[in-house]
Image: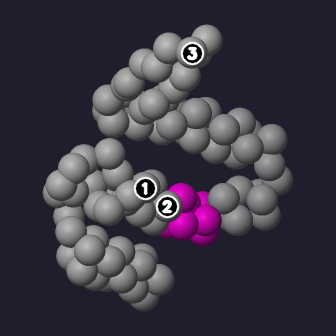
Amino acid sequence: MIAFGGSARFETLSVESLKLNATLITFSLALWWLSTPIGRQHIQRSAGLVCLLLAALLLSYYGESGPLKPPALAFPQSDLLELVLGIGFYS
């Protein structure tokens, strides 16, 4: 929900996700362009963490923290999926 002047406007997940991804890609490309070869190596190695954070954002939207009532992913399922996702990215 984004509030402007007392009125509320709801945007769907896809619109917000596109905005977030476009900002993230733009920032990453600018960082890549301004970096040295060693800096680019660090950017490559941290790309997995950025993907993990975006996946966790999506899971939390459909889990208990999101606006859906009842949530699409209930308490144990959402936490177990986050655990599997985290272990998968770090292994």
Q: Identify the residue shown where x is 49% and y is 61%.
A: 53
Lower sequence index among marks 3 and 2: 3
Residue 69 locus on image (x, y percent)? 21, 50
Identify the amino acid type marked 2. Answer: Leu
Over which residues does the magenta segment extend? 44-51
Q: Nearer the viewer, mark 3 or mark 1?
A: 3
Q: Which residue is mark 3?
A: 6
Q: Which residue is mark 2?
A: 53
Q: Main SS type for the magenta part?
A: helix
Q: Quadrant of residue 87?
A: bottom left
Mark 1, residue position: 57
Pointer 2 local density, CA inside 10 Å: few below 14, some 14–19, many at least 20 = few
Quadrant including the N terminus: top left
Q: Residues within 10 Å of mark 1 (few under 14, many from 20)?
A: some
Residue 42 showing in the rendered view: yes
For numbered disc 3, what is the local secondary structure? loop
Question: Observer-nearest residue: 4 or 30?
Answer: 4
Q: Is residue 88 visible?
A: no
Name the mark nearer the viewer: 1 or 2. 1
Pointer 3 and pointer 1: residues touching (CB < 8 Å)? Answer: no
Total of numbered circles in the picture?
3
The residue nearer to you, when weighing 71 against 61, is: 71
Q: Is residue 41 above or below residue 19?
A: below
